[in-house]
Amino acid sequence: MKYTVITGASSGIGYETALAFASRGKNLIIVARRKDELEKLKQEIEQINPNLEVVIRTTDLSVSKNVYELYEDLKNYQIETWINNAGFGNFASVADQNLNKIESMLHVNIEALTIFSSLYARDYSKVEGTQLINVSSAGGYRILESSVTYCATKFYVSAFTEGLAQELKAQGANMQAKVLAPASTETEFAKRAFDLNDFSLEGVVPKYHTAKEMAEFMLELYDSEKVLGIVNGSTYEFELKDPIFPYAAIKRS
Amino acid sequence: MKYTVITGASSGIGYETALAFASRGKNLIIVARRKDELEKLKQEIEQINPNLEVVIRTTDLSVSKNVYELYEDLKNYQIETWINNAGFGNFASVADQNLNKIESMLHVNIEALTIFSSLYARDYSKVEGTQLINVSSAGGYRILESSVTYCATKFYVSAFTEGLAQELKAQGANMQAKVLAPASTETEFAKRAFDLNDFSLEGVVPKYHTAKEMAEFMLELYDSEKVLGIVNGSTYEFELKDPIFPYAAIKRS
């Protein structure tokens, strides 16, 4: 029995991605801090397809010990797809930013993603049909004012994942690594970035996608042979692309 | 009395940069883990100019508590320039990399640099003549095979620092933020990246700079109004440039 792991599945793009993969008949391992939300998601999935297995794991990925423990805990599952979706933003100038929140952001957006990606590539890169999908952001290709540190974490995710994708291809590995780069999406993301209890994108950004639309783009990326699925910053259309950042292979004599 | 802080000053570009700033008559706060090397550097500086103050601080920047403690400990010094030079690389595929080393690398290359940059900008952005210089890499603009995670940390540094530079300009701040992006340099860097005791770039890369040359480039960047000093990957010439990554200001109505 094969499973799809989705981190940050308690809301937003992660939640909708779980539903989208369930509609494809995929068994799921859903990960987040909030148990109630994962239970609700599990119930929704059971309504879509009662034959699917849904495994719930609650943990805080800002602590690296938890990251290793979760991976170890999933050793007995056969993991077909691993989606590192957990992550959050922060809206403040660098000089004004709350460094406790920034450290948590670095741990979740960068460190947890790197540990999971490395361990998953180590164990599964030779397994046919496996995919690692890391969720970056349009801000991982273009720096946004007052979100500089968040964007820098997403530049890391984009470069790391594009580089891994190229490395896997050069090795003739079976695993594909891919980057999803959403732009503004109607989720709890903005609420957390702005430290607000209530927030709507309506009227704040010219255009945005719903989490459900982004989950559809996730499936498009999953089905394609391309490395990058990105929301165009001008047209807001979803585009499947080859890697954007320059990449240099080592010259072999 | 004003000071220039240089992290990772015990060898390589950091060591030579300390000598270069001493030749400009700058008092120094030199930071690294190895006390003996810093004492040696201090003696060398005293020979260049016995009137300079040289403050030694030994600490391990892979532990974030140490980062905050060091910054707090320097509160009584007036810091004119802060150079985040500490950092190291790793040469391995993502699937094969040693995750303990990778975690330390993330902490030094990304987390310590972010904490120092944020605190320094918070306290000094309105002080005339102040500069923050973060050492990235040519690999912070182009991903190199088998150094994917290292390059991703340097993409972070480049995006973070370019973004901060733009943010400071938009705020009309007095502080300038700059990125130095060296390519292959003859230092202990390769030794640590390859986990070797002895290593020379001779014959391994087509061309490289000495640490002393890179310290001269550091001074050129320090003297210029440009944000980026980068070694051209083809010609190996040093170029002063405007930011490379796209940047989007928030539209204000």
Image (spheres, coloured by chain):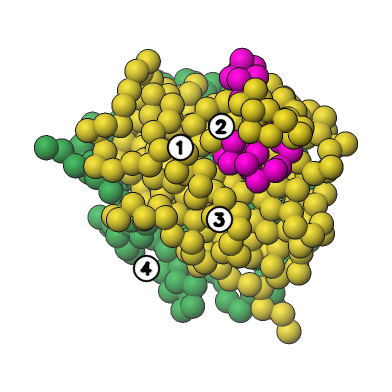
Chain colours: A yellow, B green
Q: How many marks?
A: 4
Identify which amino acid the numbered label 3 is placed on: Leu
Q: Which residue is mark 1?
A: A211
**How far is mark 2 from mark 1, CA to CA?**
8 Å
Q: Name the side, left or right, on which B98 lies relative to A39.
A: right
Q: Secondary structure at mark 1?
A: helix
Question: Separation of disc 3 and disc 1 at Cα?
Answer: 15 Å
**Residue drawn at (42%, 63%) of the image:** B230
Query: Where is mark 2, residue-wise?
Result: A15
Q: Which mark is residue A221?
A: 3
Q: Amino acid at mark 4?
A: Glu
The residue indicated by pointer 4 is B239
For discs 4 and 3, the disc positioned in front in the rendered view: 3
Circle 4: is it few (<14), some (14-19), or many (20+) Cα within 10 Å? some
- CB under 8 Å between callouts 3 and 2? no
Which quadrant would the N terminus of chain B be assigned to in this image? top left
Q: Are marks 2 and 1 in contact (CB under 8 Å)?
A: yes
